[in-house]
Amino acid sequence: MKDLTKIEEILLLSIWELKDKAYGFKIRHHVSNIIGKDFTYGNLYSALDRLTRKKYVSKRPGESTSQRRGKTRMYYTLSSAGIEALKSACVLNQKLWAGLKPCSFETQSK
Amino acid sequence: MKPSRSKFPKFGDWLLRLFARYDVNPHLRGDFDEEFSFIYETKGYGRAWFWYWTHLLRSLPVFIKDILYWRFVMYKNYLKTALRSLKRHKVFSFINIIGLSVGLACCILILQYIKHEFSFDKFHENSGYIYRILQHQKGNIYQGTDIFNTTPAILAPSAREDFPHDAKLTRVKNYERQVRFDNKQFYEKRFLYAEQEFLDIFSFPVVKGNPKTALKEPNTVMITREMAQKYFGEKDPLNKIINIDNKQDYRITGVLENVPDNSHLKFDFLASFSSLLSTWGQNQLTSWQNSSVRTYIKLNKNSSPQKFNSQLKKYDTVGFGGHPASFHLQPLLDIHLGHKVAFDLPGKGDMRYIYLYSAITLFILLIACFNYMNLSIARSFSRGKEIGVRKVVGAKRKSLISQFLGESLVLSLFSLVLALFIVRLALPVFNYLIGRNIQFDLLTNIVFVFCLIGLGIFAGLIAGIYPAIFLSSFKPTTVLKGRSESISKSTTSLRNALIIVQFAVSVCLIICALVINQQLHYIKNTKLGLDKDSIITIPMPNKRMWEKYNVFKSELSQQANILDITASKSLPTEIDNTAQVRLGGKNQGETLRVWVNWVDFNFIDFYKMNIVQGRNFIKESPQDLENAYIINETAAKAVGLEDLRGKKLGRGQIIGVVEDFHFAPLHSEIQPLVLMLDPGSLKVLSVRINSNDISNTLSFIQNKWKRIFPDFPFVFSFLDERIESMYETEMKLGQSFNYFTLIAILLSCLGLLGLASYMAEKKTKEIGIRKVLGATVPNILVLLTREFTRFVFLANIIAWPIAYFAMNKWLQSFAYRIDIGLWIFAVSSLLALFMALLTVSYQSIKAATANPVDSLRYE
């Protein structure tokens, strides 16, 4: 299995966290908050498509609201492969950070 | 507060619908709307609107990138299917690729030709302001026109004096000169005299020397790079002295770049005009009668051709033979392709040839495209299933059209590559046929590369558009049920029309080729009225040489293989001097335009012409040397048919009448001619030799020449070859038609071959059943070939009038011509029919002799 890119990891985590509310608008806001930058719909859907093709997420159309002028939401949920990918990413991260105190660079630079 | 429907950005939504990914399109637009309403409710319309647009514009690049990615994947699929279908249908692909590449190769060559023809004289910086002065001598018809490109020598100096602020002028005079440096001596045909302004008006780059002063002094000359190499090798030619005509010494004052092929003025030597003074004398240079120089002019920005034309009215004068002469400007850029004028320089282009070649090329490309259309449509029923399946799976008509167009584009681009190879191979032949030297170098010409790709795409579209529309219109239910025959029936009429057009073009070309070749044959075998065989001609342009003429003559006559020798001003087939003579007798007061040749006394015997009345010249008779004229029959008729003895013409005494002979190409009728004796005007030697052992005789003559004329180059030509070269244009036209006809027939037959094999395949079952029911092999052959025979007949009916009209027009340019006989039409029709049947027969015989069991066993 290929390693996830950072943005894929963030997206998968966001979808996981948003649970059954994971659709375009919400995911974009969540990701933008995390990375602290405006994450565009263009990038979002391009990345979501890559995840869909890798079968890490599945999509299903949902309900619509009057704010959306009748256009339905597209909900994304993690597939089992997606969860596996997240797990291995988590292990990799832990290995990377093992023995290091997170965010304590000040001490190191002494 | 929620935004009302009208507040949503409509144009933005439309843009998104256009560019956002297909699979999530509505959801994505929904997300945009939802966020828009969210910001609208919290921060107001302005902010929401601003967010919508900035976000949309930021997202757009990614959307577009995605679209391109998917398009590319789709095109990859089309390309794959296209290549697969090319590979699977080998005969089909072969026919189409060969046809299209030959068609494209023809197109590329013709495009190059047209480009070259239109580029003439454009390289001059001021080409738009340069003109040549033409002289109109009303009524003085010469070479089919009364407009001359030569002007009096005094015209340019007068205009320079009268209108100093309007224009720059230069006189130009071309000569053939003998040039000698050390032991190298040659006749140089491209020897030009011009004034200092020449280099100012035209942009011929100067490599060495000062262009401001190089042509000022008399007896100075500039040479081209090529000539510098020829005479001086690696040495510096500047200030070297070359000898001209064994008379004068010219100093070299500069080196010019070689004159480009696309210049109408071509020269190797450019001498100062003032050098002519010593040979011409002041009188000639200031005479309004000496119309032998060309005048070029560059108008200043403050003048205009209209204005200058009216200024030229001042110089209206009386020209040759009392015809009124006036002058007007001709733009430099019109010279190469413009109307014919008298004394045109060799190598002039002809718009008619450009039209002709373009039309033929277009026809050939069309034949190739028709082949593609025909074969694609014929094949359609075997592709019906593929189309049906694609449609059932969800292919839209638009995408099917682009698939089939893609296939034809792949094919035509394939052919384009092959065409480039063909062009490489055919270029020498083509250059020979059009008499030009066109280079073909792709790398230096990016624009041309794009033109080529454009051409390939154009051909692909022409060939593919109809089949694409037609194939994509299939209804899946019909084709998948296997009723494809009903489809192919609906296109039969179009297919037939295409075949008929193809064959009409071929038949047309066959007729033209036959007529042209017949006329050429006629020209070659027409009795000229003189014996032209085994005669070599040696130019002796210098007067000094004629002092030793008799010595040379007696030296030569010692050799047994040299039968006779004579001399004349012009060769009897190329007489180009005219004069006006006053008629005597009852036509007193009238003048007659006659052609004149000055000859040696044995000229008539030498060329085995017949004296029909009176007598020949008598050797060394002072009377004859004084004023004896021998005229031809046409002149005799013009003078009056009675007894001519003692009759006068002008100041000459008519002593005899010679039988008419063709002293000019067969384009014009025989004109009145006068032969007279004048040892001082002779210019060319004719030697009749024995046709065995020519090379020994030639080397004998050359040895004698070297001894007697050590200062003059030995150059010779055979008279019959010179005569043939007068019809070079026609000969080359004939050859081009032969090539083009061959190509057209080949392509038509290739198309027919492909079609025939599909027809035979389609009719396999029908043939099987017919055979079972008792049809014989000939019966079936007739069945299979009947249709094609009918096409060829229809094609003939279309082609005949077109070919007749065109060829009749062409033949009008000859005063002596063949009649277009019915047999030419019959032969070309039979030829076309024979070719068609030959092509079809292989498939037909195979189908007719097949065992019906094989074709019917699956029924």
Image (tube, coloured by chain):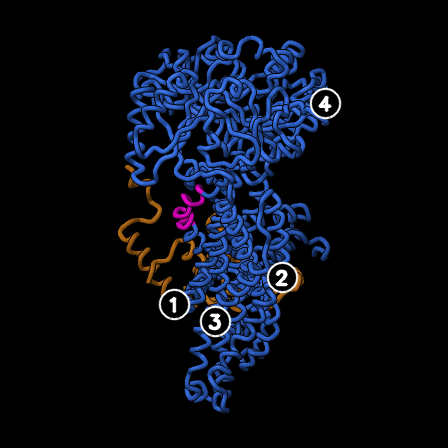
Chain colours: A orange, B blue
Image height check: is A29 above or below B268? below
- Mark closer to the observer (3, 1): 3
Which residue is label 2 attached to? B798
Q: Are marks 2 and 1 on the same chain?
A: no
Which residue is label 4 attached to? B589
Q: Which chain is indicated by disc 3? A: B
Image height check: is B93 above or below B610? below
Distance from Cα at disc 2 to Cα at disc 3: 22 Å
Distance from Cα at disc 2 to Cα at disc 4: 56 Å
Instruction: Name the residue rendered at 65%, 21% in the picture.
Output: B320
Q: Which chain is indicated by disc 1? A: A
Position of residue B774 measured from the top left corner of the image (x, y, whole percent): 49, 90
Q: Are marks 2 and 3 on the same chain?
A: yes
Residue B840 disc label: 3
Residue density around tag 2, few if under 14, some if 14–19, many if 20 or more, within 10 Å: some
Tag 3: amino acid = Val
